[in-house]
Amino acid sequence: MLDCPRCRQPVDKQAIACPYCNATLKAYGHPGITIHRETGEGYLCESCTYHEDDTCTFPQRPYARECTLYRNKMRPTLAQPTYTPGFGGSVRLWVNRNGLLLGLAGLLLISFLLVLFSR
């Protein structure tokens, strides 16, 4: 259970609006996206990770008092595991990404060899 930011009553975390004060808790049409609100006098952007690293695209930036993208820069984030494939894995990944280019290069090589040996 979460507390409503307006009336501080306990509310189910899946609720779209507070049953006590009718405050909107989720983004309209997207019940899985939470709306973060500034409860004091400041703005959310002052403590947001996206504002700090200049990747925020929110139109109300830097004066947003409500935001669906907000990430508190004081809250630690979980480290994402990094995957570093070996040489074979890197080559396989490159071939998967550039298959069309390799196919065209192969056709060009075959046509060049056919022209060269047909004389």
Image (cartoon, rainbow, N blue to C red):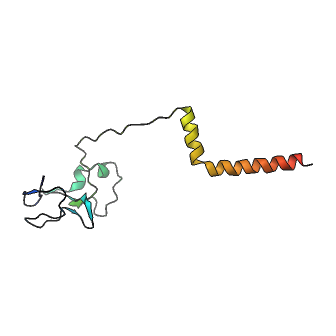
Q: Is residue 3 left or right of residue 54?
A: left
Q: Quadrant of residue 89?
A: top right
Coordinates of residue 61 in the picture (x, y in percent) = 28, 60
The residue at 36%/53% (across/down) is: 55
Q: Is residue 111 left or right of residue 99?
A: right
Q: Is residue 114 left or right of residue 46?
A: right
Q: How many marks?
A: 0
- The residue sitting at the right extreme is 119
Coordinates of residue 13 in the picture (x, y in percent) = 17, 55
The residue at 16%/64% (across/down) is: 17
Between 13 and 58, the one nearer to me in the picture: 13
The residue at 23%/48% (across/down) is: 72
Coordinates of residue 47 in the picture (x, y in percent) = 23, 49
Q: Quadrant of residue 91?
A: top right
Between 46 and 49, the one nearer to me in the picture: 49
Between 112 and 44, the one nearer to me in the picture: 112
Q: Quadrant of residue 38?
A: bottom left
Coordinates of residue 79 in the picture (x, y in percent) = 32, 38
